[in-house]
Amino acid sequence: MTESTNLLTSTLASTWRGWQGIAARTDTDQPRQMLQLYEFENCPHCRIVREVLTELDLDAQIYPCPKGGERFRDQAMALGGKAQFPLLIDPNTGAEMYESMDIVGYLYQQYGNDDVPMRWRIVPLQKLSSYLASAARMTRGTYAVPSKPPELLLELYSFEGSPFARPVREVLCQMEIPYILRSCGRSEPGEWLPPKLRDALGIEPNSKLHNRVALLEKEGKQGIPYLYDPNTGEGLFESEAIIGYLEDTYARD
């Protein structure tokens, strides 16, 4: 798939989802221990959960379980009792649950201190549009490819609806590379502008989201996606550069 086609179909996937998984709330409770999510990127049900992680500004340890994967699928089965995804583990409460809409309800009640928004209650429409988004990406983020496991979890600054972050998450999933998802949704008007346009206009969004603040302090700018690898000390913006790095560093010879 060429870079332009990749971006086009990724944009189409976000469009099918009505650009959900972009805006983030700033008033949610943050769990003391990080959530754990066993999933695979192009699963329509998993996508719904990741969108809500963005909306509620929640980080999570992501354990990719693509089809044919051998790294975390057995672990997920041992934890939950069946090979079904998504599987959410909340070490703060001991909750373990399948079913995307059950997880959505749990996250809103536990960390959003709120009822589930009406749009999430229209379950058939949510699932249909998520299936269409998966179809737009065909098999990307679905099947495992050989890779070398990292010693430490990588960190990906991302928001679910980003057409640029999606290809990176797909490669991480296919390579079965676990990572910490640092949710970086948008909460300020200036954050809806592309970074280059913000720079040209001299706009500096005063973000209230802890991960965006941390990224700005760390790198001097906010750009999504951003990957940090504590195993090598590398930090990279731009999806193409990140994917090249992952393949060079973790692809199995």
Image (cartoon, helix red, strand yellow):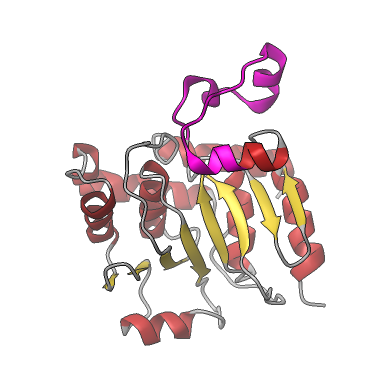
x%, y% of residue 194?
A: 62, 25
Q: Quadrant of residue 203?
A: top right
* Residue 171 higher or lower than 111, as above or below: below
- Residue lying at 71% horizontally and 40% vertically, measured from the top left: 219
The percent position of residue 77, horizontal first and vertical second, equals 39, 84
In the image, residue 197 lies in the stretch drawn in magenta:
yes
**Residue 80 horizontal side relative to residue 8, left or right:** left
Q: Is residue 224 above or below residue 247?
A: above
The reply, left or right, for residue 213 in relation to residue 197 is left
Is residue 126 or residue 223 the one in the foreground? 223
Residue 223 or residue 41, whichever sits in front: 223
What residue sits 38% from the left and 69% below the top? 85
Q: Which residues are magenta?
A: 186-214
Is residue 158 found left or right of 245 in the rendered image? left
Magenta-colored stretch includes residue 198: yes
Position of residue 86 measured from the top left corner of the image (x, y, whole percent): 37, 66
Q: Which residue is pictured at 42% across the width and 52% down the height?
A: 50
Identify the image quadrant of residue 217: top right
Residue 83 on image: x %, y %: 38, 79
Q: Is residue 15 above or below residue 226?
A: above
Whether residue 104 is visible: yes
Residue 224 visible in the current orientation: no
